Image: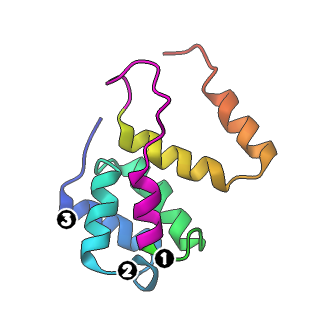
Amino acid sequence: MTRLSLDDAVTLFTRIAGRGSAGDEEEIFAAVRLCGRLPLAIQLTAARLAQGYPRRLADLVDELSQTPARLNRPGEVSPQVISAFDLVLRALDPGHQRFFRQLGINPVP
Protein backbone atom coordinates (compact mmCIF):
# COMPACT_ATOMS: atom_id res chain seq x y z
CA MET A 1 0.00 0.00 0.00
CA THR A 2 1.61 3.25 -1.14
CA ARG A 3 0.99 6.25 1.09
CA LEU A 4 1.41 9.75 -0.29
CA SER A 5 3.43 12.42 1.43
CA LEU A 6 1.22 14.83 3.36
CA ASP A 7 1.81 17.55 0.74
CA ASP A 8 0.92 15.23 -2.15
CA ALA A 9 -2.14 13.95 -0.30
CA VAL A 10 -3.38 17.50 0.32
CA THR A 11 -2.74 18.43 -3.32
CA LEU A 12 -4.69 15.39 -4.56
CA PHE A 13 -7.57 16.06 -2.16
CA THR A 14 -7.78 19.74 -3.09
CA ARG A 15 -7.57 19.04 -6.82
CA ILE A 16 -10.46 16.56 -6.67
CA ALA A 17 -12.65 18.34 -4.11
CA GLY A 18 -12.09 21.75 -5.65
CA ARG A 19 -10.42 24.65 -3.92
CA GLY A 20 -13.77 26.16 -2.89
CA SER A 21 -15.13 22.92 -1.44
CA ALA A 22 -11.97 21.83 0.32
CA GLY A 23 -12.27 24.04 3.39
CA ASP A 24 -9.51 25.20 5.66
CA GLU A 25 -6.06 23.66 5.71
CA GLU A 26 -6.40 21.95 9.10
CA GLU A 27 -9.60 20.19 8.00
CA ILE A 28 -7.89 19.04 4.80
CA PHE A 29 -4.95 17.70 6.83
CA ALA A 30 -7.39 15.85 9.08
CA ALA A 31 -9.27 14.37 6.11
CA VAL A 32 -6.17 13.05 4.35
CA ARG A 33 -4.80 11.64 7.61
CA LEU A 34 -8.11 9.86 8.23
CA CYS A 35 -7.78 8.43 4.70
CA GLY A 36 -4.38 7.09 5.72
CA ARG A 37 -2.80 9.23 2.95
CA LEU A 38 -3.91 6.44 0.59
CA PRO A 39 -4.61 7.71 -2.96
CA LEU A 40 -7.77 5.67 -3.56
CA ALA A 41 -9.28 6.60 -0.20
CA ILE A 42 -8.46 10.28 -0.82
CA GLN A 43 -9.95 10.18 -4.31
CA LEU A 44 -13.19 8.58 -3.13
CA THR A 45 -13.52 10.90 -0.16
CA ALA A 46 -12.71 14.12 -2.04
CA ALA A 47 -15.09 13.13 -4.85
CA ARG A 48 -17.95 12.86 -2.35
CA LEU A 49 -17.20 16.36 -1.14
CA ALA A 50 -17.00 17.65 -4.73
CA GLN A 51 -20.47 16.18 -5.37
CA GLY A 52 -21.88 17.98 -2.34
CA TYR A 53 -22.13 15.03 0.03
CA PRO A 54 -21.63 16.16 2.68
CA ARG A 55 -21.76 19.90 2.14
CA ARG A 56 -18.99 20.82 4.59
CA LEU A 57 -15.55 19.34 5.01
CA ALA A 58 -15.99 19.42 8.80
CA ASP A 59 -18.95 17.04 8.42
CA LEU A 60 -16.87 14.77 6.20
CA VAL A 61 -14.05 14.68 8.75
CA ASP A 62 -16.61 13.84 11.44
CA GLU A 63 -17.99 10.95 9.38
CA LEU A 64 -14.50 9.61 8.65
CA SER A 65 -13.71 9.75 12.35
CA GLN A 66 -16.51 7.31 13.11
CA THR A 67 -14.87 4.05 12.02
CA PRO A 68 -17.30 1.15 11.62
CA ALA A 69 -16.83 -1.45 14.36
CA ARG A 70 -17.27 -4.46 12.12
CA LEU A 71 -13.75 -5.63 11.40
CA ASN A 72 -13.53 -9.41 11.31
CA ARG A 73 -9.80 -9.50 12.04
CA PRO A 74 -8.23 -6.41 13.61
CA GLY A 75 -5.28 -5.11 11.65
CA GLU A 76 -6.34 -6.85 8.43
CA VAL A 77 -7.66 -3.67 6.83
CA SER A 78 -6.86 -0.10 7.77
CA PRO A 79 -9.74 1.58 9.62
CA GLN A 80 -9.16 4.67 7.48
CA VAL A 81 -9.81 2.69 4.31
CA ILE A 82 -12.93 1.14 5.78
CA SER A 83 -14.22 4.59 6.78
CA ALA A 84 -13.64 5.99 3.30
CA PHE A 85 -15.37 3.07 1.59
CA ASP A 86 -18.21 3.15 4.11
CA LEU A 87 -18.75 6.85 3.41
CA VAL A 88 -18.91 6.22 -0.33
CA LEU A 89 -21.18 3.18 0.08
CA ARG A 90 -23.75 5.16 2.07
CA ALA A 91 -23.99 7.70 -0.75
CA LEU A 92 -24.90 5.08 -3.38
CA ASP A 93 -28.42 4.06 -4.33
CA PRO A 94 -29.46 0.56 -3.12
CA GLY A 95 -28.75 -1.17 -6.46
CA HIS A 96 -25.25 0.21 -6.62
CA GLN A 97 -24.67 -0.64 -2.95
CA ARG A 98 -25.52 -4.27 -3.70
CA PHE A 99 -23.15 -4.34 -6.68
CA PHE A 100 -20.37 -2.76 -4.61
CA ARG A 101 -20.81 -5.37 -1.89
CA GLN A 102 -20.72 -8.17 -4.46
CA LEU A 103 -17.32 -6.98 -5.62
CA GLY A 104 -15.97 -8.06 -2.24
CA ILE A 105 -17.17 -11.62 -2.78
CA ASN A 106 -14.67 -12.21 -5.60
CA PRO A 107 -12.39 -15.08 -4.45
CA VAL A 108 -9.34 -13.74 -6.27
CA PRO A 109 -6.62 -12.62 -3.83
Residue 42 location (% of width, % of height): 40, 56
| Crowd band around label 3 with a 10 angstrom C-alpha radius: few (<14), some (14–19), many (20+) | few
Does residue 79 show up magenta in the picture?
no
Residue mark closest to the camera, 3 vs 1: 1
Image quarter for residue 77? top left
**Mark 3 — residue?**
7
Point 38% across, 53% down: residue: 65
**Mark 2 — residue?**
23
| Crowd band around label 2 with a 10 angstrom C-alpha radius: few (<14), some (14–19), many (20+) | some
Q: In which quarter of the image is the N terminus?
A: top left
Q: Callout 2: helix, strand or loop?
A: loop
Q: Callout 1: helix, strand or loop?
A: loop
* Magenta stretch bounds: 58-77
Q: Which mark is residue 56?
A: 1
At label 1, the amino acid type is Arg
Does residue 70 show up magenta in the picture?
yes
Point 69% across, 28% down: residue: 102
Q: Are marks 1 and 2 in contact (CB under 8 Å)?
A: yes
Q: Is residue 51 above or below residue 21?
A: above
At label 3, the amino acid type is Asp
| Crowd band around label 1 with a 10 angstrom C-alpha radius: few (<14), some (14–19), many (20+) | few
Point 31% across, 71% down: residue: 27
